[in-house]
Image (cartoon, rainbow, N blue to C red):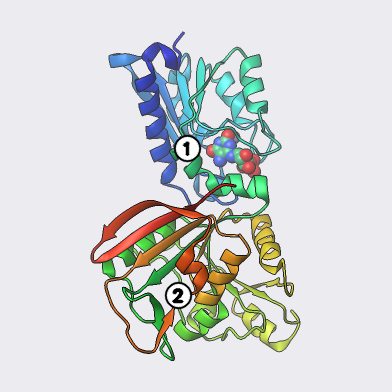
Amino acid sequence: MTTPSDAGAGFDARIMAAALRLSRRHVGLTADNPSVGCLIVQGTGKNARIVGRGVTALGGRPHAERVALAEAGDAARGAVAYVTLEPCAHHGRTGPCAVALAQAGIAAVAIGADDPDPRVDGRGRIILHAAGVVVHDLMAEPEGTRAFEGFLSRIRRGRPFVTLKMAVSRDGFIGRRGEGQIAISGAVSNRQTHGVRAEMDAILVGIGTALADDPALTCRLPGLKSRSPARIVIDPRLRLPPDGQLARTARDVSVIVATAVDPDGDAAKALRSQGCRLLPLTAGEGALRSLLEALSRLGISTLLVEGGAETASRFLREGLVDRVVLVRGAVTLGGRGVAAPPEVRHLNGFRASRTERFGGDRWTEYERIEA
Ligand code: AOF
Ligand code: ZN
């Protein structure tokens, strides 16, 4: 019987890494499901052949294992399946993947990460064991964890994984008073930002930014335009103009407006008639957390907070940010500059994990230091 260990740890790790790369293709496109990768390998060493490959389909179903098994057909018999997430055990819209793998005659399954969904949570393994399928743990951390961080956050904490992105000028400003959108980051890092957007389930701004910039908040990379995340505006008094870029395009890419205003009033009706969806925003402490919980219930696992200063500060102050992307632009703004808020300047509780140069900009990611 072929098992991952027969072929050697290096071989197994390489196949699992390939399955993870495969899973990245649909990150941001499978909500409320995580994007999972599955490779089915027949034979070992030099004779090893990939006979089936699958990634969770757009919209979340069918699951990766089903796609890979369909490609493998009879070649699945006696083969090893490398799956980045524990195969599911529940009867959702299709039967459990663990059962499908066993029935197809898969001899061994290598699992990249446990599935904490209460409907799975170890039951996938139990089904495989009971059917005589050898199960190997091949935890592919930290990349494995990163691929599922949104899913894990939603299941374990009931809120999306939150990434905060800010651009700061060389002299420490985030904009110029009285001026709308102003270029701080250059073309190369802007393309990188659009790439990040494409992998998110949703992107959020405060109403101040929505009014000042009239942004589209879409992903505009060639070939990736259909990968725009849902757009969310925090708008307590419902000032978002129904004829602005966001509301006008709400039927193409969804717009969610979080507001404390009467959902049956005229402003609400006008936005709804454009296709915007309204969510209630409670007042005061805990409002953001409740909003995040509501978004999580809508199936949103990953959220990019993109502005402005006040929204960024609130998210940081309330401890709701998991990663910060700080783009330090090459430009200087000089007089009338709006300083980055203290929470952004200090980033207490975060540590820099990665720095790159994109054109003239410095792009740094900060991870939260776990207490
Ligand atoms: C897998 N393979 O490719 C994915 C899995 O609503 P359902 O029936 O699609 O189930 C959703 C749950 O399935 C989700 O919360 C997660 O636990 C698991 N996702 N499982 O076997 C996959 N995407
Ligand atoms: Zn499944």
Q: Label 1 sits on what residue type?
A: Gly
Is 353 on the left or on the right of 244, as rendered? left
The extreme left residue here reads 359
The extreme bottom residue here reads 178
- Local packing at callout 1 (Cα closer than 10 Å; few below 14, some 14-19, many 20+) is some
Q: Quadrant of residue 317?
A: bottom right
Mark 2 Cβ and ligand 1 under 8 Å apart? no
Q: Label 2 sits on what residue type?
A: Ala
Quadrant of the image where one finds ligand 2: top right
Determine the residue positioned at 50% across, 80% down. Answer: 209
The extreme top residue here reads 1
* Image location of residue 362, percent across then percent down: 30, 62
Q: For numbered disc 2, what is the local secondary structure?
A: loop
Is 102 on the left or on the right of 344, as rendered? right
Is 57 on the left or on the right of 93, as rendered? left
* Marks 1 and 2, how far apart at CA: 33 Å
**Of discs 1 and 2, which sits in the foreground?**
2
Q: Which mark is residue 144?
A: 1
Q: Is residue 251 visible?
A: no
Q: Is residue 208 above or below residue 110?
A: below
* Image location of residue 270, percent across then percent down: 64, 85
Q: Choose between 354 and 125: the one closer to the eye.
A: 354
Determine the residue positioned at 55% across, 79% down. Answer: 247
- Local packing at callout 2 (Cα closer than 10 Å; few below 14, some 14-19, many 20+) is many
Q: Earlier in the sequence, mark 1 or mark 2?
A: 1
Q: Is residue 347 visible?
A: yes
Q: For numbered disc 1, what is the local secondary structure?
A: helix
In this rendering, the count of numbered labels is 2
Q: Which residue is labeled 2 in the image? A: 340
* Image location of residue 103, percent across then percent down: 58, 19
Q: Choose between 184 and 299: the one closer to the eye.
A: 184
Q: Is residue 144 above or below residue 191?
A: above
